[in-house]
Image (tube, grey):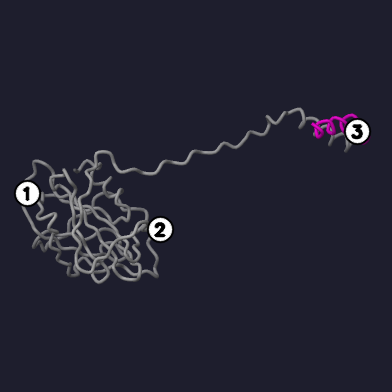
Amino acid sequence: MRTARKSWKTCTLGAVAVAALLSSAACDSGGADGRGNPAASGAAGAPGAGTPSGTPAPSGTTARPGGGAGTSGPSQSPGGGDTAVAACNDNDLSIDTSGWRQDSGRHLLITATNFTDKPCILYHHPYVRFGTDIGDPIPPAGSAPRAVATIGPKEKAYAGVFVFRAGQRTRTVTSISLGYQDRAPGSNRDVASLDIRLSDEVGSLTVGPDPRVTYWNTDLRAVEDLLFRSGKS
């Protein structure tokens, strides 16, 4: 209230043109009652992504030799990845395979754990073949994430496989082979892949005519979202 009275008095006593002009502006400001300055409104934070509704809960994995327990909070590196971090290979990773309860074996989850003491990057999508297949690896599903999957020591990354859909003609396999890419898409395609026997929990796979594999991702929920909401399940 003291400030408002002072402004009014300045308007009344204006003796020169500059003072009158300044006092006039002060009077106008005092009469606005603060309505000319809208208060900033805070935006509500977006809720975190939840586990997809209707997604079967993943069953436990079977650890392979050399694997280690994972830690929470793996990160995604922006863009094409950190050039100082090497691409992951067979010597860096332990691979586990698992499925989802009440899924009837239609999908497979591949979990890669970095058991070294240095980070590495899983580029693009894994090269996956079934059983004794020696032809082209199965093609990718969906679009590539905006960030590559960088996994530190004991951290994990995931890829999901669409194995078959109801009503398709299928065959049964008990193993897969897995290969890794470098920064350049399509690299290492002809390099020998690692043969992996499916975990006891999975047992065998019933493979349809058009399986697909997702891109590597450190976010399991993102992989599940693609597997169970893309319309291919």
The C terminus lies in quadrant: top left
Residue that mark 3 sits on: 14
Against 230, is 125 above or below? below
> Which tag, 3 or 1, sits closer to the chain's start?
3
Give the extent of the magenta segment.
1-16
What residue do we see at 85% from left, 33% from top? 6
The residue indicated by pointer 2 is 78
Question: Picture quarter containing residue 84?
Answer: bottom left
Q: Amino acid at mark 2?
A: Pro
Magenta segment includes 227: no
Q: Mark 3 touching mark 2, by CB under 8 A? A: no
Judged from the image, the secondary structure of the residue bearing numbered disc 2 is: strand
Mark sitting on residue 160: none
Residue 144, position as x, y percentages in the image: 31, 53
Question: CB of mark 1 within 8 Å of CB of mark 2?
Answer: no
Q: Residue at x 38, y 58 (%)?
A: 75
Can residue 3 be found in the magenta stretch?
Answer: yes
Residue 25, placed above or below residue 81: above
Residue 52, given in percent of the width and then of the height, sits at 29, 42
Three-letter residue code for mark 3: Gly
Q: Residues within 10 Å of mark 2 (few under 14, many from 20)?
A: few
Q: Earlier in the sequence, mark 1 or mark 2?
A: 2
In the picture of the structure, the residue carrying the numbered disc 1 is 170
Mark 1 and mark 2: Cα distance apart in space? 39 Å
Magenta stretch prevailing secondary structure: helix
